[in-house]
Amino acid sequence: MAPSGSPKGSLEPKASASPMDRLAGLALAPVHLIMGLADKPLRAWQKRTGIGGMALFFLAPNMLIFGMFVLLPIVINIVYSLTGGTALFLSERSFVGLDQYRQLFNCANYLDAMTCQEDAFWTSLDNTFWFVVLQVTLMILASLITALILNRELAARSFWRAVFFFPVLLSPVVVGLIWKWILQRQGLLNFTLLPFGFEPHTWLSDRGFAFGAAVGVSIWAHMGFYTLILLAGLQAIPKDLYEAAQMDGTRPARIFWRITLPLLMPNLLVVVVLALIKAVQVFDEVFILTGGGPGTSTLFLTQYIYETGFVSQPRNAGLAAAASILMGLVLVVLTLIQLGVGRKNEAKGKR
Amino acid sequence: MGNARGFLTRRKGGKGWHWTDIVTWVWLIGGLIVMFGPAVWLTFSSFKTPAALAEFPPSILPYVTQQVKVDGYEKPLALFEAKMPDGSTQVLAEVRRVGIVAQMVDPKAPGQIIRVNIADRQPVREIAFATENYTKPFTQFDFVQYLWNSVFVTVTATLITLIVNSMAAFALSKYEFKGRNAAMLVILATLMVPLSVILVPLYSIISTVGLFNNLWGVILPTVATPTGVFILRQYMLTIPDELIDAARMDKASEWQIYWRIILPLTAPALAVLAIFSVVWRWNDFLWPLIVLSRRELYTLQVGLSIYSGELNVQWHYILAMTVVTMIPVVLVFIFLQRFITTGIAGSGLK
Amino acid sequence: MALKSLLAASALTLMTTTAHAGDVRIMWYSDGIEGEVFQDLVSRFMKDNPGINVIVDNVAYSVIKEQLPVQLEAGNGPDIARVTAIKDLAKHWLDLRPLVSNAAYWDENFGANADWMRPDGSNQISGFMTQLTLTGGFANKTLFEQAGVALPGPKATWAEWAAAAKKVAASQQIPYPMALDRSGHRITAPNISYGANYVGADGKPAKLDAGAKAYLGQFIGWTKDGTMSKDVWVSAAGQSYRAAADDFINGQVAFYYAGSWQIPNFAKKIGSNFDWVATGSPCGPTSCTGLPGGAALVAVKYTKNPKDVAKVMEYLSSETVVKEFSERTLFLPAHKGVIAKGVSFKSDSQLVKDALNTFVGASKSTADAAQKMPGWRWSDTLYGAIVTRTAQAVAGEMTAEEAFTRIDSDVADKVKASGL
């Protein structure tokens, strides 16, 4: 479906170099030098080990760091979930087998979270599910619209792009704080509504609104990230395709479905995967915004894990680990599905 | 292309408003308000005094009650607009308040005390920027040290991330080898594990290898980002293999292929990753908070958290320092986002 | 080139992380200006003792609460820390008894609270309370006057306060007659006034008794009929702490139940907007108690130079330093000698002085059950369960009865999981 030529056809340097480029070139000079120096020993390595050895070389640094600081903790976490007690370090904990999992799954009726021993776990699972569905769908929609709009010929396009990207620059803590102040009783929203005769309302004490706010605020905070990825994809679509379509008098909607969307697929896939993962992990900004309330209506999985393992007295690191393993399992299944979709697309791309 | 940028899009030939133009501008203006508005409000709020921050209804701009020096009183007095019994209003200075009655004086004739019900007086307010929210933390707070630590962590982590991730992405996208899919799967699967979940094990690893209270303890666990590998790999998949084959024919080594062909072509994706990495590392909070408990190692985000106490939070300092910490990332973005456009435009799209 | 300077810089950073002998690191958190005052006092110490380098690491409270225990368990951590979970972590504290020159001074002046911060059954001197806190009420006097409602007297009950506050709210058009912080510590005070006793015969948590159920039931009812602010309780899930202080500062609440630590905050933020008074704790059928608490400065066992640590602790606990610290921070001191001689708090507001004195007076009517809570290992477990479930009942997710059952089962689970 996609044209076999990549968006980047040529290696030729640009004809005219702006001062900015020259500056970048200057900064890159030492890098080039170092990279050149590294070439000699690597050539020798390549001779000895062949392409496979080079693959190993390229992969090794990342996988080493990764194994040590991501994989190993996960493995330790699995062991954790099989232990009990209040001690934090494995050597002092007692082995309890699957007790922690049993506690999580101890329910009288699986359709009603309130009948479970760990009702908060199931409530947070339910909340997280709906959050992911709503947030991911709406955010991708919003990002796509924004990217399409920013891809048009606009005055001051880089300014507009910066506008939508701006919230991504803020730390999650700040995002939560800003919106809390806007939505709280003495906040900006009530202040703006006051002249229109609305009585001050505590928006965040309203279950539906609080959930909506959690979704909305996290879209606000992250959509710039995804818009940028989509925009990069849109700009990589050759303009002559559009021109040809226009000359044929194709309707814009048809252009979108037939040209834009298929060519955007690789980027859209990246966006969907990343957005989904981030949504499942939602924590900081919502925690600051609603704290999980009102009641438990915006209590999400990560908050449950954090509270169980870190905040509650005495801490229950084993139970928290077990909950996180369950969460991980769900996510791995999701990834596998995504990967399947991705592979199909890659296969299409190669043709 | 690109010449004569008007306020209207040119796709429709510049004649009249197509409905898409209207949608575009509604979306853009709405986006401007929604995206920037809160931050502008944050910036104004950072200049408010603690009392003004807690106030309802809130104001957009920072206001304080005007004060005036009155003869016979040591301290400056607050000015109020008081409704007099005869219905007129007069600007008076408040001496003290006893219950619901305020004792006030006319600043011009300070001899006589006038009693006014507190419901009948409104403070006279003026805009004043509480710059001490900024200056005080700067003096108490080793700002330069924190800034240096933040810059060091951000720059180092970003450089390592770019190199290590792009190498891994290259291997995963352009080589066929045993275990490639397994490696990709592992990376993707762990993409999903939030930091808060593996805090305790990660902490025990860091303290075992002696990186506790060390900036490298903050940097290393973050650099092998699965997200980065994923983005770069997806991008590299779009680079045609023919280019690499041609280079191999020219006797280029694999390393040369990586940094002379693949890296330049991946520039836009690298720029995107660089921006994200800078933003992430700059805003990292939870992890540095755990690893760094010594003042001389604090990053800015950790530094500004010291204003959160058990029972009270000193919002005025937090806001001011937040605005300060925002500035560098905004600058980096402005610089790098140009690079994305040139990267895309310069790679021979036409 | 850039890379080289970066490497040099990183080497430099690595070097600065190694500790020097003679360093004493203090981990400190602040609710207000106490960090500044403390730094000032420490600087004076360093001038007199040039051999000892005291470094104050200001941290967020969450570091003390969530990260410090992890560090301690790994044998890391600062030399001295300002902590609130003092009993829970008692096994990590250093015994200063053999190190200080005058242990009798410590027993005499800090003996009353020493048990809060040492392992059960020892006579260890772990440190001292930097401040005592006591829960208690605040009334917006101006609102009461404007409404023409008399302030209930010192022996007034919770019900009387509720009735008066409702009258004020109705006449002054404010949204909340009363507010109580979302905190298990705060709500435990009235529970005890209603006769609750959390401690079972074996020292482990007992099931909720009639006293606790009576007040909690009443409280949940009050949030439903609007007597008590519901918003602060539903504003989070789990056991997060939320204060209703901003509503009181804005004159939206007639009666607010918090504690002595709010006084400096009110002084700064309310200014002359209205008059406020501390009222002590309203009465229940059994007593009129507040709940004591506070933060302690303790020495950590894993320190490399205990001698210097002891010197610093001796200086900080000396009568003049404690007195100056309390006077400048407006904290209630825990030092017997200082209390006996009287403290002249540094504030030009009469409201503040009156309020502080009210709390000093109210501390005399603290019930025994309340006095026991800070030194009891399981108090935080109960506070957590009570907040979590009561808040759910307030939000309408369960009935009061269900909440009580859940509190009991949550606590039982926690006790069981801890393996103690």
Image (tube, rainbow, N blue to C red):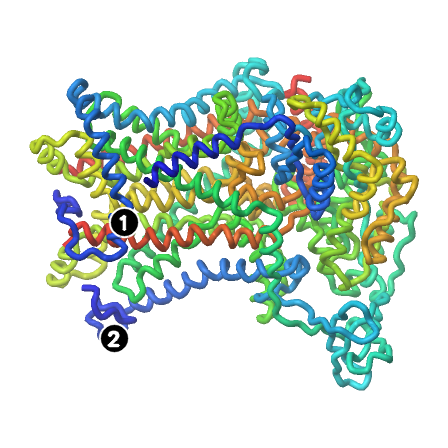
Judged left or right of residue C198, residue B195 is left
Which chain is home to disc 2? B
What is the quadrant of the N terminus of chain C in the image? top left
Instruction: Inspect the image, locate mark 2, and give the three-letter code of the amino acid beneath it.
Output: Gly
**What distance separates the C-alpha of mark 1 from that of mark 2?**
42 Å
Task: Label 1: state its secondary structure.
Answer: helix
- Of residue B297 and residue C411, the one placed in the foreground of this image is B297
Instruction: Identify which residue is drawn at 50% across, 23% down.
Output: B210
- Of residue C362 and residue C379, the one placed in the foreground of this image is C362
Say which residue label 1 marks.
A24
Asked whether the residues under the numbered discs 1 and 2 touch, taking CB atoms below 8 Å apart as contact, a structural biologist would say no
Task: Tell me which corner region of the image, top left, top right, bottom left or bottom right, holds residue C102.
Answer: top right
Task: Tell me which corner region of the image, top left, top right, bottom left or bottom right, holds residue C152.
Answer: bottom right
Task: Label 2: state its secondary structure.
Answer: loop
Q: Are marks 1 and 2 on the same chain?
A: no
x, y percent for residue C314: 78, 30
Say which residue label 2 marks.
B16
Count residues near mark 1 (Cα–Cα under 10 Å), then give few for <14, some for 14-19, many for 20+: few
Instruction: Inspect the image, locate mark 1, and give the three-letter code of the amino acid beneath it.
Output: Ala
Instruction: Identify which residue is drawn at 43% across, 22% down.
Output: A72
Judged left or right of residue A137, residue A283 is right
What is the quadrant of the C terminus of chain C in the image? top right
Task: Tell me which corner region of the image, top left, top right, bottom left or bottom right, holds residue C270.
Answer: bottom right
Which chain is home to disc 1? A
Instruction: Identify which residue is drawn at 37% across, 39% down.
Output: B158
Camera-nearest label, 1 or 2 = 1
